[in-house]
Image (tube, rainbow, N blue to C red):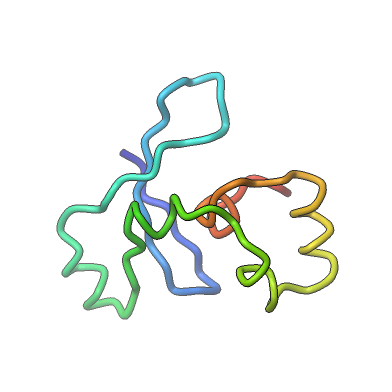
Amino acid sequence: MSILFNAAAFLVAGAERQDPHMVNAVFVDVPGGEIYRRAALRLATTAELNQPLEDRHLSLLAEEERKDIAYHQPSRLGDLLFNWLD
């Protein structure tokens, strides 16, 4: 498992790569979350990260970020929060 960190959102998630040739990972719940909570980080759940990406998720993004989303077309909220778009 890999631990993913979104510094801007103080968010932590877990992911496992199913195919080493693919960028998309399978999101998994992070065990031992207390250590992250002590550091004032929030753990994202698998259910949250696998939500389909909707317009409401994009409302606070800058125009340039929305252009990246339109180009790369991530399908899940987790793909937006922990992306490889750069």
Where residue 51 appears, x then y in whole percent?
47, 55
Q: Is residue 72 left or right of residue 44?
A: right
Above or below, comparing residue 54 to residue 17 in the picture: below
Task: Name the foreground residue: 39 vs 11.
Answer: 11
Q: Quadrant of residue 69?
A: bottom right
Q: Is residue 6 left or right of residue 47?
A: right
Q: In the image, what residue occupies the spot 34% across and 49% down? A: 14
Label tally: 0
Q: In the image, what residue occupies the spot 54% across and 50% down? A: 76
Q: In the image, what residue occupies the spot 18% across and 53% down? A: 31
Where residue 18 appears, x then y in whole percent?
41, 25
Above or below, comparing residue 52 to residue 54 in the picture: above
Q: Quadrant of residue 60?
A: bottom right
Q: In the image, what residue occupies the spot 80% across and 52% down? A: 70
* Quadrant showing the N terminus: top left
Where residue 27 appears, x then y in whole percent?
38, 44
Q: Is residue 49 left or right of residue 21?
A: left
Task: Name the foreground residue: 19 vs 35.
Answer: 19
